[in-house]
């Protein structure tokens, strides 16, 4: 998984801007019963505020000129703590805010209807996203304190699980997944993103380790076939087999080859 899931900045900004907040509801005294003739079936307003006994606003439900609609919730100090609303495009969103006024969590739908849940640290940096894109399976993305993607776990559209690791620069360094036949495979990448190592089981369960040079050329293979002993193969920069060392029926066997791949020496 080479790409991290995204949040919707417009949604988060709009929710925190005014019409969304947090309610840590203090109970208010019950209202006195009114006579039937004083009851109205319909209350029409663009803004409704709920206040506590001290007059502190604890909740607000409002419709803005841009068409966005939101419920804002506030704590006993009047600080925004969370909210739920609809933007002018009709997409819903939920935000959670800490006592310092910092966004810590957001649940939203993107324009294509894909849901995602984002978590933020105390500095407001996005640290994790769990989402379900329409064109793929569910995925989890993890970010460091600098906002760089460092890990991802996703199910591809065909159900294949993939775990990806990234360095501090956001470059891919490792990937662990399953092949189509269900066999596990591990890829290792250098700082340029070039594949340098491959460790896998084939469809018969045979383990193999493959090493590549900086140009992506296969230079060595170490494997353990079921019908024989372990074997090591070495190749030159052109990918030509130059040496092989294996156990044949328990006996060691070494073969050396020239640049054309022709055997020039073997023992025994």
Image (cartoon, grey):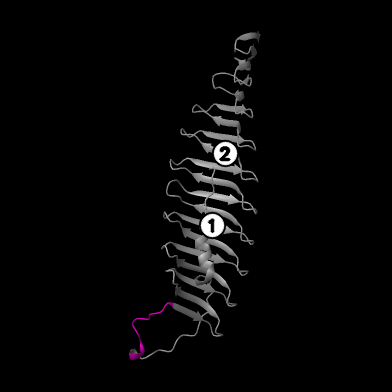
Q: Is residue 41 left or right of residue 250?
A: left
Viewport quadrant of the C terminus:
top right
Give the spatial CA distance, label 1 vs label 2: 23 Å
Give the quarter of the image for residue 113.
bottom left
Q: Residue at x 60, y 51 (%)?
A: 143
User: In terms of secondary structure, where does tag 2 sit?
Assistant: strand
In the picture, the disc for residue 17 is none
Residue 114: x and y, percent? 44, 54
Start-end of magenta stretch = 37-46
In the rendered image, residue 183, in percent from the top left (x then y), is placed at 50, 33
Residue 244 found in image quarter: top right
The answer to whether the residue labelled 1 contacts the one labelled 2, judged by CB atoms less than 8 Å apart, is no
Residue occupied by mark 2: 175
On whether residue 147 falls in the magenta region, the answer is no
- In this rendering, position of residue 69 left or right of residue 16: left
- The answer, for residue 23, to whether it is visible in the render is no
Q: How crowded is mark 2: few (under 14 residues within 10 Å), some or many (20 or more)?
A: many
The residue positioned 59% from the left and 46% from the top of the image is 151
* SS type, badge 1: strand
Above or below, 15 against 57 in this view is above
Q: Name the residue under label 1.
A: 118
Location of residue 66 with respect to 55 vertically, above or below: above
Closer to the chain start, of discs 1 and 2, is: 1
């Amino acid at each position: 998984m080479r790409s991290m899931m995204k949040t919707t900045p417009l949604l988060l900004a709009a929710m925190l801007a005014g019409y969304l907040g947090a309610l840590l509801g203090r109970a208010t005294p019950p209202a006195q019963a009114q006579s039937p003739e004083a009851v109205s079936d319909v209350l029409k307003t663009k803004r409704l505020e709920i206040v506590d006994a001290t007059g502190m606003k604890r909740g607000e439900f409002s419709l803005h000129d841009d068409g966005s609609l939101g419920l804002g919730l506030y704590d006993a100090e009047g600080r925004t703590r969370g909210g739920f609303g609809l933007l002018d495009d009709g997409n819903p969103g939920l935000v959670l805010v800490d006592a310092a006024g910092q966004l810590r969590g957001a649940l939203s739908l993107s324009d294509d209807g894909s849901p995602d849940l984002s978590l933020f640290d105390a500095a407001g940096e996005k640290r994790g996203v769990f989402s379900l894109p329409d064109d793929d399976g569910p995925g989890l993305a993890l970010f460091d304190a600098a906002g760089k993607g460092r890990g991802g776990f996703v199910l591809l559209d065909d159900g294949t699980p993939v775990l990806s690791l990234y360095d501090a620069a956001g470059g891919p360094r490792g990937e662990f997944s399953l092949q189509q036949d269900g066999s596990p495979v591990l890829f290792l990448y250098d700082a340029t993103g070039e594949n340098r190592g491959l460790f896998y089981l084939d469809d018969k369960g045979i383990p193999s380790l493959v090493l590549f040079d900086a140009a992506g050329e296969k230079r060595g293979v170490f494997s353990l076939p079921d019908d024989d002993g372990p074997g090591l193969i070495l190749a030159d920069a052109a990918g030509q087999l130059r040496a092989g060392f294996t156990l044949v029926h328990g006996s060691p066997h070494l073969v050396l080859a020239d640049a054309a791949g022709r055997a020039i020496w073997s023992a025994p």
